[in-house]
Amino acid sequence: MKLRKLFFLVALFVFSIVAKAQVVTLEECHSMARENYPAIARFSIIEESKNYTLANANKAYFPQLSLEAKATYQSDVITIPLDMPGLEIPVPDKDQYQIVAQANQIIWDGGKIAAKKEMVKAGAQAEEKQLETELYALRERVNGLYFGILLMQEQLKQQSVLEEELQRNHDKVESYVENGIANQGDLSAVKIEMLKAGQQRIQMESAKEAYLQMLSILTGKALSNESEFVKPQISDNNSLVTIKRPELDLFTAQQATIDAQSTDLKSSIMPVIGAFVQGGYGKPGLNMLQNEFDTFFLGGIKLSWNIGNLYTFKNSLKANELKKLSIDTQRDTFIHNLTMQISQQQNEIEKYRKTMRDDEEIIRLQQQIKDAADAKVENGAMTVSDMLKELTALDMAKQAKLLHEIQHINSIYTLKNTTN
């Protein structure tokens, strides 16, 4: 029984370690947010819709069957005005009946079906690229939440260091009070700083919890305070950037759609050659003078040409060229704005890099000041309140360093997100 209990405790301890060792990376959050985004289902919908439409377009090459039945009554019929003795020419009845089945087969359509298929493919490609731009916007939202959590995570660690330092100072001041070096007011000052530190912790934990909840919704994965968020690895080389944004692919896909429309316009002015066969049963048959029900059939080749499209053909092509020029202008404007944004973000990265160079030195000097203040308090040359000010200044310097580090990493990933 004791062995079983010991095994249970060991298993529980191992499980708790594994649970607490949950590691989360920025790339994983990007991937999970993409997979969890409801609009991701549109990719399969676009693909299936394209396949169905292409299948329907291909069926235009199959023989097109039709069936027609009609019954008519005519006010007059064909008569032959001959009056010869012994010759009786039959006169058709004014009521006529006919059932006709016909099959049409395209031989050459001037590229109409192929143009329709290209339009379907280009349209589906443009829809997919549009969806990619929507999904890409998720990255910026994930980055903001991830780095917010990362900052709170690091600041909470520093906050624990501050609270431990305040507790040590509290213990020291208590001994000073007992030895008559400090008074009760000094001890109260330390307690106030401890309470303030506790309030800061509550604010940080609350902010982290809010970030965790929002990131959990975006990624579809339950994230908790036990999750360890990893600092992304960064590269200092940001001088050379290559723009590979999905919007550029979208512009290309939109122009391809217009090109497909132009091809469809060109095919619309071409004639269509086809074969047909027709069979039927009616009164009369093909012989109009035979006044009885009969079967019949006929077949042949026909050419049809809608020359009305020629009237608007040139203007339609010019309109499509203007649409492509408009897209070129949008692309140039997009790249122009992006270039300015990249320059600004590179300056931000350099600013944080320069700021970080001085953080370590500021902390080192502030630590010396704080240590000197501790010695002065022990010698009675400084009040506890003044010493606490130096302690607060040291903590602020360390917090500033953490903030600058996270801001530096965030600025680099913001640049990556801007350029892809």
Image (cartoon, helix red, strand yellow):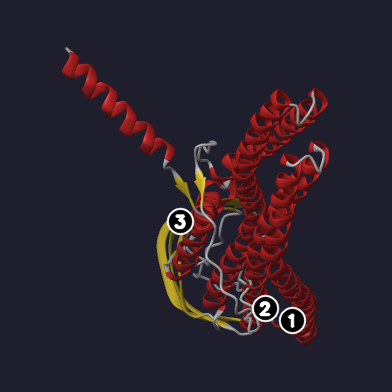
Image x and y of residue 360, in percent: 66, 64
User: Which of the two discs, 3 and 1, sits closer to the camera?
Assistant: 1
- Residue 414, labelled with which disc? none
| Real-space Cα separation, disc 2 to disc 3, in angstroms | 62 Å
- Residue 292, labelled with which disc? 3
**Which residue lies at the image location 81% right of the left edge and 43% below the top edge?**
381
The quarter of the picture where the C terminus appears is bottom right
Residue type marked 3? Glu
Proximity of marks 1 and 2: CB atoms separated by less than 8 Å? yes
Residue type marked 1? Lys
Label 2 element class:
helix
The quarter of the picture where the N terminus appears is top left
Residue under circle 2? 255
Image x and y of residue 399, in percent: 70, 51
Q: Is residue 402 visible?
A: yes
**Which residue lies at the image location 57% right of the left edge and 48% below the top edge?**
37
